[in-house]
Amino acid sequence: MKTNSNSNANASKSVPATPKSPAALQWVAYDLKWREFYPNESRRMTTIGNIHAMQSEHLWFAEHTPIPFKTHWPEMDIIASLAVRYLCELARQGNDHAIREAGSIAIEVCELLDELLHGESATVDERAKELRRLAEELPYWPMLHFKHRQAVNHFERLADKLHLGERCWLNADERANYSLQTPVNRLAWRCVRHFQEIHEILGRRFSSDEPEQTIQERLANYVLNDRGQGMIYEHEIPIYEASLRLCKLSKKTARDWVDVAFMPWIKVRWPDLRVLPAFASVDTGPNGRRYAPARRKLTEALTGLAPGA
C-alpha cells in the first residue's frame, strides 16, 4: 500500500499543469484591471452625483429665469455629447450593454424630436430653425418610423421645414438612388461627414493668399487632448490641409477625394483594413495593408453617392 501511495504521488507530480484557455486568461486580466481601474465605487458615484446636481441647477434656471435660460449654455450638453460618443464606440466594439443603451437613447431622442417639431406654430418654426443648420448637412433625418405608412406621411413637411440636405456633400436629391445600409456606402458617408464637419468648423475653404500656418493653428485647436476634447489627431493635420485644397465633391472629383483625403485618413485610423466591414469582400492582403483594391471600391461607392456636378 505504501509503495502504491508513493507511486501515485510521484505520478501526480509528473503530470504537467493544464494551461489555461485564452478565455480564462482574458477573465484573469479583466479582473486584475477592474480592481486597478475601480478600486472602489467613490469615483463613479461622485461623477453621477455631479451630473444630478448640474441637472438640478439647470432646472432652477429654467423655472426662475426662463428668458435667460433660453440661451443658457448648460455643461450637460458637453457631458452628454462626450458620453454618447464613447457609448457608440463601445457599441461598435461589441459591448451588449452599450448596444442596448444606444438603442434606448436613440428612441428617446427621436421621440423628443418628434415632440419638438410636431404641428404648425411659431414655436415649432423657431425650434426647426435651431435644428436647420444640422439638417442642411445631412441626407437623412432621425425620426419615428411606423409599420403603417399613414403615421409617417409628415416626412415631406418636416424635410422642407428643416431644409434637409441643402448643404449636404452627398446627393440629397429626392431622385438619388443609394442606400447607407451598404457597408462601403456607410464608410464613405462616415468619411464625408467627418471632413464636412472639419471644413464647416474651419468656416471656409483654403485660399492661396492665406498663410499656411494659420490653417495649421486652426486645425491644432481641434486636436484630441488627454481630457477627451477634440476630434482629430495631430499627425492627421496634413491630410485635412490637403483636403481644403480639393474642389467640391462630385462624381468627377470623387477619386481625388478618396486619394487625397479619405484613404489617407482611413489608413491612419484603421491601418489594418480587415477590421472594416466595408472591405470584407476585398483582398486586403494577409496584414490588411493592401490598400489599392480598397481604394478602388471606396472610389466606386463615393462616385455613386456624390452629386453630379
Image: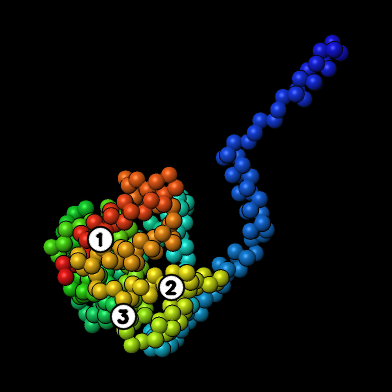
Q: Find disc 1 in the rendering and name its residue.
A: 302
Comes first in the chain, label 1 or label 2 = 2
Residue occupying the point 18% across, 73% down: 160
Which of the pair 71/150 is nearer the observer? 71
Colour scheme of the picture: rainbow
Identify residue type, mark 2. Answer: Ile
Residue occupying the point 30% across, 69% down: 113
| Gap in angstroms between the C-alphas marked 2 and 3 | 15 Å
Q: Find disc 3 in the rendering and name its residue.
A: 205
Judge whether residue 264 can be spotted in this image: yes
Residue occupying the point 83% across, 17% down: 6
Identify residue type, mark 1. Answer: Leu
Hey, which residue is sitting farthest left in the picture? 175
Q: Where residue 279 appears, x then y in whole percent?
A: 34, 50
Q: Which mark is residue 237?
A: 2
Q: Which marked residue is nearer to the observer: mark 1 or mark 2?
A: 2
Q: In which quarter of the image is residue 121?
A: bottom left
Q: Where residue 271 appears, x then y in whole percent?
A: 44, 56
Q: What element carries label 2?
A: helix
Q: Residues within 10 Å of mark 1 (few under 14, many from 20)?
A: many
Comes first in the chain, label 1 or label 3 = 3
Q: In which quarter of the image is residue 244?
A: bottom left
Residue occupying the point 33% across, 72% down: 243
Q: In which quarter of the image is the C terminus?
A: bottom left
Identify residue type, mark 3. Answer: Arg
Reply above or below: 40 against 7.
below
Comes first in the chain, label 2 or label 3 = 3
Left or right placement of residue 291 versus residue 174 in this view: right
Q: Where residue 209 appears, x then y in whole percent?
A: 33, 88
| Gap in angstroms between the C-alphas marked 1 and 2 | 23 Å
Reply above or below: 62 against 140.
below
Q: What element carries label 1?
A: helix
